[in-house]
Image (cartoon, rainbow, N blue to C red):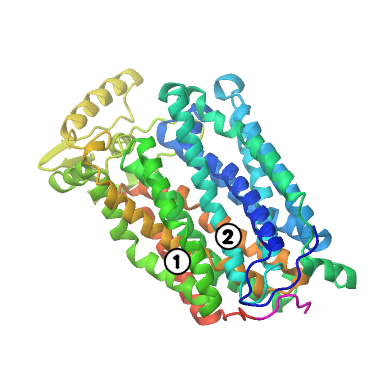
Amino acid sequence: MASPQPAQSGVGITKEERLVIFASSLGTVFEWYDFYLYGSLAAFISKHFFVAVNETTSFIFALLAFAAGFFVRPFGALVFGRLGDLIGRKYTFLVTIVLMGGATFVVGVLPGYATLGIAAPVILISLRLLQGLALGGEYGGAATYVAEHAPPGKRGYFTSFIQTTATLGLFLSLIVIMVVRIAVGNKAFEDYGWRIPFILSIVLLAVSIWIRLKLSESPVFKKMKEEGKQSKAPLTESFLRWGNLKIVLLVLFGGVAGQGVVWYTGMFYELFFLLQTLKMDAQQANLIVAFALIIGTPFFIVFGVLSDKIGRKKIIMVGCVLAAITYFPIFKGLTKYANPDLLAAQEAEPVTVVADPAECTFQFDPVGKATFKTSCDIIKGYLGNARIPYKNETAAAGAIAQVKVGGQVLTSFDGTKLAAADFKAQKAAFEKQLAGATKMYPSKADPRKINQPMVILLLVILVIYVTMVYAPIGAWLVELFPARIRYTSMSLPYHIGNGWFGGFLPTIAFALVAATGDIYYGLWYPIIVALMTAVIGTLFMHETDTQGSISHQD
């Protein structure tokens, strides 16, 4: 394919430019599909690969394995960013998609803990690390490639299609999961059907490679290569020279950190919240989330185009602020409309744990051998497994923990000195009492009482926040860095912001909720990070020239 000729702002998209956008976006959709399958199926994966521990620890382990892929994304950005600046954009993101697709397929056929023992979760986490490395090189390549084909004044519009790919990849994963679940039935899906979406990724991989092979190199990179102006040491130029390093740090803390937490709150944490906290049926929750994505996704293009007209920074900062000040009412609204019985129980019979804080531990058991026997742990262990929210009240040092349920008060017992059989018997009797006292708290959300239009509306608002912070970010990052080190410089802060600040959000938020009993406590993490970005970005980041050329070599 011949390289597209530069177009003037305001001129329609050429055939070549459409192919560039379509091929880059389609390949990236498939790559995000691969990556987010794991997040969507974390609950099933925990049951097959992390079965030697208690339920709370198992799910936290599954989320940690999910987060492991995010942990290595910055390292993938360094490796593939450097390659992209040295050998070209096209060939680098061909390599990344092969790694991603291959690792995803292997997850689908990997035997579980029952067959391989401890080797199963070790291999699983290794595959997640490989996926994270690949994704670390994917986004920077795709965004840079498309932006370098875009005419001045249309970079926000062109790259907004790349920004939709993460949402579309998540949407595609949800659709495939639902279709497979319906086809094989719930029981079969829990046993083996969850593997099928992973296995199907091999077909998507073949299509992605075929399409990307049709592309030629970026015109900006080709010109640099012909003129011999490529960077010989992109890592050194990007991170060991203060002028560029300062921009990298400002981009991280004043841009992509807030964008990352807003993205993962609106795209992933809300699904965990519906499934794990509000106990919605998985199929119904996935359908509602998918419908909200359909409504909200076009706003990527809306805000991409708007950023070409009024600037990238303004839209991102406003999105961070709006998200931070409305997250609590939105998630409380989700509780009201998705599980009104839970809200009614909280209001009529609030649960309070009265205990000496020294007796209360965070019940994370990595090896599955610990037994939590203090009077506080016995109460919180039951409430945590039953997903019953509670408040904490400090008791006198050494006091036996109590739990208040409405007007009832139940006193726990100290099991630390009891024989195993006696402890088991007393624990069963106490938990039976506690189950009776908390019977008003629903074990599942009642599908008949879910106000679907209101739940969808609240989810659409969360998606719109995502589009505000995410749609302009690709063009903004490309415009902030010179072409010779662009792939490397933009990839690292992007993947620290999204991979670390954003990717660890479900794990951190879930752990905060498990530790406090407050189902909304995990929201403090994205709120604080989003506000940090809004302050730093507003004060120290500058707006870029949306109408100028980005082929500069300086």
Magenta residues, start to end: 548-554
* Furthest residue toward left: 407
Which quarter of the image is occupied by the N terminus? bottom right
Provide the major secondary structure of the magenta segment.
loop
Decide which of 427, 173 is in the foreground and name it. 173
Q: Is residue 60 left or right of residue 484?
A: left
For residue 330, the mark is none
State the CA–CA distance, disc 1 to disc 2.
24 Å
For residue 530, the mark is 1
Residue 520 placement (x, y as % from top left): 32, 53
Upstream in sequence: badge 1 or badge 2: 2
Q: Nearer the viewer, mark 1 or mark 2?
A: 2
Residue 463 placement (x, y as % from top left): 42, 57
Residue 479 placement (x, y as % from top left): 65, 74
- Is residue 437 on the magenta stretch? no
Q: Which residue in the protein does label 2 denote?
A: 161
Find numbered disc 2 in the image and state the secondary structure of the residue it sits on. helix
Find numbered disc 1 in the image and state the secondary structure of the residue it sits on. helix
The residue that appears at 52% across and 43% down in the rendered structure is: 172
Q: Residues within 10 Å of mark 1 (few under 14, many from 20)?
A: many
Q: Residues within 10 Å of mark 2 (few under 14, many from 20)?
A: many
Residue 10 placement (x, y as % from top left): 61, 76
Q: Is residue 18 left or right of residue 320?
A: right
Q: Identify which amino acid the numbered label 2 is placed on.
A: Phe
Res 531 → quadrant: bottom left
Res 244 → quadrant: bottom right
Q: Identify which amino acid the numbered label 1 is placed on.
A: Ala
The residue that appears at 27% across and 52% down in the rendered structure is: 454
Decide which of 373, 119 is in the foreground and name it. 119
The residue that appears at 80% across and 67% down in the rendered structure is: 221
Decide which of 278, 290 is in the foreground and name it. 290
Which quarter of the image is occupied by the C terminus? bottom right
